[in-house]
Amino acid sequence: MKGLLKFITCGSVDDGKSTLIGHILYDSKLLFADQERALELDSKVGSRGGKIDYSLLLDGLMAEREQGITIDVAYRYFTTDNRSFIVADTPGHEEYTRNMAVGASFADLAVILVDASQGVLVQTRRHARICSLMGIRYFVFAINKMDLVKYDKTVFDKIEKQIDELKAELLLDNVVIIPLSATEGDNVTQKSVNIPWYNGPALLEYLEKVDITEKNTEEGFYMPVQRVCRPDHNFRGFQGQIESGSISVGDELISLPGNEKASVKQLLAAGKSVEKAFTGQPVTITLDREVDVSRGCVLAKNINLAAYKRLFVSLLWMDDSKLEEGGEYLVKLGTKTIVGIVTKIKYAIDVNTGEHIHTEKLSKNGIAACEILLNEAIIADKFEYHKTLGEFILIDRITNMTSACGVVEEVGEKESGFSDKASFKHNGIEARGDIFEEFFYSEESRAVLKYQTVRNTYTIGDKIPTKGVSYNYPDSFDILVLRDNVAVKIRNKEVVDILTFDSYTYENYPVINGRGFEIKVNSNEDIQKLISEYKNTNPNDDLIAKWMNFNTYRGIALQLDYNI
């Protein structure tokens, strides 16, 4: 028996999507007796003159029945002797394109219906493009209502040519074209005697046999962290779903974007300790040393991933208001949600011709290539390489509604990781240098963004820049990088010592944390208490407020003060 197939039905209004799935359920004897009887009774008051209206099995809302169209996405779960299925019947009307995109995001295969009497329409092209955008790689174009064109092969051939052109334009793979009649049952669950010139399988036969198992082209192991589990001070686990590869106890992992290495101490799956876990499993991972990991970070092994602030994307705009250059949104990618600005609409795409159109605004249901600048660097990749790290949504910051969905086509310049960006090193001791981050306010986007403008690595004897555009530190002070357990002593702008907390002693100089905020301490006892609380308490707002002053040495500059 083949594995589960998740597929979507889509197309233009009244192409017969709901009727098609209803007919499959009815012919396959997948209804209970009371459902079948209710369908027959409901059909008597329908539009088919008393004949069974198979669409009523899916169009459950009264508004849908009255209009004769699907509004919401209707999901159905069913099993035949050969396979299990989940199908999403999606709206055909342009007004509900966003609903259709939601259905496409979960599917492995798309059944796109085409009315034989009308051929390929604009909405057909839009749906095919959206399905491709959402990563669907298997397509069935069902040429429906062949009964209305008297099963004419010349009509089918003409539409087949249109689909071939669309296939070439969108670079679609694994395309099958099936002539059928959803209302009469031709080529739905079994081959039709009315279409003798067609030699391929009926739709259900194809769906039962198609092998959508793709080779895992994603390299290595990676797991976006959804949650840090810390029930007590003795346990710190990182929870998420494995998106690629496998992981075993003892494996060395790298945490991104920090680039810290640690080995797997324990693996938990379904609440039980296991020695190994695989793609698709939700797990809890504990490590053999403390690393700076929070929600939105990625644990990885044998994989080439990096952090980026600039993404080049293709997106479907789903908001009633228009997308304009400079618009600011929450960007949700993987398990990370962060502020981002649509800095440029490179071009919109004409869904009918595929033509690239210059524009500075995008209306609802429009598709465009855009550039997005993020507030800070996050782990991302091209959608074709790592799907989970290459798909995203834009969320309106005021209404919290989903404004767009899309995929990453290209990534900008890599942001340096732990070992590369401004940091302090000496005799194997290393600490991050986030004290050199600049904060600026952009009037255009009305957002505060940050940039790592200094990317040097400092050791004992080096001079450091104590003054920047948005920061101003004393000439002599101490840095406590709590997440790395490292102290750095600065005297007269020079690094004089880099040491672990075990060897550090407070000397009455100003103290800042690794991000440049003043630490409120006046004695060595205060230092030890801070370190203890940080280690034994999951860092939170109360802990930060207790020990930190934010505006002593830092401020926010205007974007015009320096070039980014």
Image (cartoon, rainbow, N blue to C red):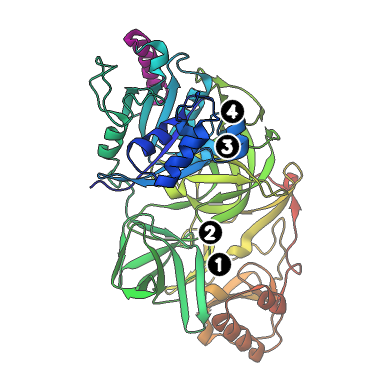
State left or right for residue 9 relative to residue 357. Answer: left
Do tag 2 and tag 1 residues touch (Cβ < 8 Å)? yes
Q: Tags 1 and 3 in contact by the CB under 8 Å rule?
A: no
Q: What span is in magenta?
A: 152-172
| Spatial CA span between label 4 and label 1 | 62 Å
Asked whether 188 or 45 is in front, the reply is 45
For the C terminus, which image quadrant? Answer: top right
Residue 510 in view in this figure: no
Of badges 2 and 1, the one in the foreground is 2
What residue is disc 3 on?
A: 98
Disc 1, SS? loop
Separation (CA) of disc 1 from disc 3: 56 Å
Residue 505 sits inside the magenta stretch: no
Q: Residue at x 70, y 47 (%)?
A: 562
Q: Identity of the amino acid at label 2?
A: Asn
Q: Badge 2 is on which residue?
A: 456
Q: Which residue is mark 4?
A: 94
* Residue 169 relative to residue 369: left or right: left
Which secondary structure type mostly characterizes the magenta part of the structure? helix
Q: Is residue 398 visible?
A: yes
Q: Which of label 3 and label 2 is nearer to you?
A: 3
